């Protein structure tokens, strides 16, 4: 059996969300948003987008979302996981999972503050906390996969809103 190298933040192509400076830059981008910031594409307003981004962290830190059943987890692993955890950027207007759909109105400041708290928690816990940690939908992930999932999704939506 061939032993694959352990993926750590030392060999990641995307910026690492576990780095304080990278997270500080993400927080700076979040803080540059206002309740009136308009999307460059898509249907969500800025408060809905922040709530949508919070779902990723809710799934990692809170017992708020139900775990998909066995069959659904197999489907997610086979058809969705690679798109979510790879370094390949998301395309504009790509469909999202039902748990991530935010169609009701949200409080901008509350969602912004929650997202910043989640980012700070991620940095505080550090990359080793996520090494082979189980995700709700995809099973055990490497540090690089967690990083890609966290960073890529947030960067995609901040870019959507021009920051």
Image (tube, grey):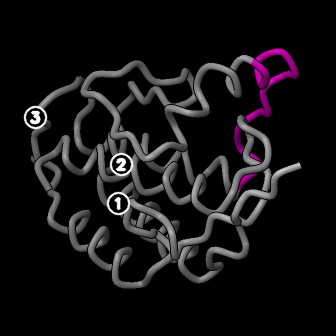
Compared to residue 18, the image places residue 4 above or below, namely above
- Name the spot of residue 158 as percent of width and height, x first: 24, 51
Q: Of marks 2 and 3, which one's residue comes earlier in the chain?
A: 3
Mark 3 crowdedness (10 Å alpha carbons): few <14, some 14-19, many ≥20:
few
To which residue does mark 3 refer? 40
Give the labeled residue for mark 2.
50
Tell me residue 138's x, y (percent).
72, 37
- SS category of the residue bearing label 1: helix
> What distance separates the C-alpha of mark 1 from that of mark 2?
6 Å
| Direction from residue 127 to residue 25 in the image, left or right | left
Identify the residue under disc 1: 112
Q: Which residues are magenta?
A: 62-74
On the image, the x and y values in percent for residue 156 come to 29, 44
Residue at figure coordinates x 39%, y 28% from the top left = 104
- The structure residue drawn at horizontal position 51% and vertical position 49%, both measured from the top left corner, is 149
> Pointer 2 and pointer 3: residues touching (CB < 8 Å)?
no
In the picture, the quarter occupied by the C terminus is: bottom left
In primary-sequence order, the first of circles 1 and 2 is 2
Classify 10 Å Cα crowding around label 2: few (below 14), some (14-19), many (20 and above). Answer: many
Residue 103 in the magenta stretch? The answer is no
Given contact means CB atoms under 8 Å apart, are the residues at marks 1 and 2 in contact?
Answer: yes
Q: For marks 3 and 1, give the CA distance.
A: 19 Å
Q: Provide the secondary structure element on which disc 2 rests.
A: helix
Name the element at disc 3.
Answer: loop
Q: Choose the circle earlier in sequence order: 3 or 1.
A: 3
């Amino acid at each position: 059996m061939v032993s694959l190298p352990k993926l750590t933040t030392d060999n990641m192509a995307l910026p690492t969300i576990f780095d304080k400076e990278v997270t500080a830059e993400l927080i700076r981008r979040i803080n540059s948003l206002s309740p009136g910031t308009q999307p460059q594409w898509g249907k969500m307003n800025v408060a809905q987008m922040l709530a949508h981004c919070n779902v990723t962290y809710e799934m990692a830190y809170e017992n708020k979302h139900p775990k998909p059943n066995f069959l659904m987890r197999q489907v997610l692993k086979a058809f969705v996981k690679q798109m979510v955890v790879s370094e390949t950027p998301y395309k504009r207007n790509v469909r999202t999972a039902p748990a991530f759909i935010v169609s009701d109105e949200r409080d901008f400041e509350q969602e912004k503050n929650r997202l910043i708290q989640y980012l700070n928690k991620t940095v505080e816990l550090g990359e080793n906390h996520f090494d082979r940690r189980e995700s709700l939908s995809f099973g055990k992930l490497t540090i690089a996969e967690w990083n890609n999932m966290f960073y890529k999704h947030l960067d995609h939506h901040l870019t959507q809103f021009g920051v």
